[in-house]
Amino acid sequence: MKILQVEGLGPVSVTKRRHQTRITVRVKPDGTIAASIPLFAPYRSAVPLCLTHRAKLIETRDKYSFNPVEGTKIGRHHTIALRHDISRSFTKNGVINVGLKGGKDLSKEARAQAVKALRIESKQRVVARVDQLAKQLDVNYKSISVKHMTSRWGSCTEQGSLNFSIYCAQLDDELLDYIIIHELSHLKFLDHSRNFWNEVARSCPDYQSLRKRLQSMRPGLAAS
């Protein structure tokens, strides 16, 4: 991998991949820009594509930016404290101490600690609620995992494994219940047929409005 400085974008990580057949570029959840190229291509071959899509990449990167202020709430039980007197960030008693001594990057430091906090909150809140609702719907699942997913809130496999985004910890109870009921209903209908939605409606009559609310949101850090 090489880091290239691209005009108007700054650092872009370029990685050669064995099975890559074309050049691609994307913004990662942490706000960094990454390009993938075929093994035979020179590293700088990624630059023209980055320049072509520069405006879109900047727009997407801005959406991922996370610059909290003192007292910013993370999830339900954590708050941000900006510490210019320490260089090492840590979380204790619900306070995310972001170490900024020595000119450390606020967004990078705060994001790393916030993600850790949300992972803990999600494991506690989501897992407990899944167990409650599974009994209510009379379904059994094989396993449950809380992951750093940014493209979807949850998923269900054919084997009955449930996956939920750590960012579910930031949602209110109604939205969280809808996501969980949605995935639990897939244990009966692994599709989005009428039967599936009827199953969802049994436990979540207001699912249509909740689904609409969720469509305007994306899994990610929401500073409040």
Image: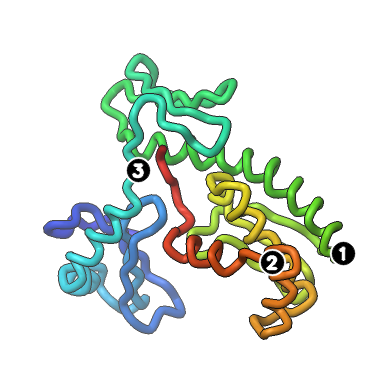
Quarter of the image where the N terminus is located: bottom left
At horizontal 34% and vertical 61% (from top left) the residue drawn is: 27
Q: Amino acid at mark 3?
A: Phe
First of labels 1, 3 by sequence position = 3
Q: Amino acid at mark 2?
A: Glu
Mark 3 against mark 2, which lies toward the viewer? 2
Q: CA distance from mark 1 to mark 3?
A: 40 Å
Can the viewer see residue 16? yes
Camera-side residue: 197 or 1? 197
Q: Secondary structure at mark 3?
A: loop
First of labels 1, 2 by sequence position = 1
Which residue is outermost to the front?
A: 205
What residue would you read off at disc 2? 183
Camera-side residue: 62 or 188? 188
What residue would you read off at disc 1? 138
Label 1 close to label 2 by CB (< 8 Å): no
Which residue is outermost to the top?
A: 85
Q: Residues within 10 Å of mark 3 (few under 14, many from 20)?
A: some
Can the viewer see residue 99? no
Q: Quadrant of residue 9?
A: bottom left
At horizontal 48% and vertical 56% (from top left) the residue drawn is: 219
First of labels 3, 2 by sequence position = 3
Q: Secondary structure at mark 2?
A: helix
Q: CA distance from mark 3 to mark 2?
A: 29 Å
Q: Amino acid at mark 1?
A: Asp
Camera-side residue: 210 or 77? 210
Task: Determine which of the numbered discs, if any, sits on residue 66 in the image.
Answer: 3
Q: Position of residue 197 (x, y in %)?
A: 67, 77
Q: Position of residue 136 (x, y in %)?
A: 83, 58
At horizontal 46% and vertical 80% (from top left) the residue drawn is: 19
* Relative to 68, 103 lies left or right: left
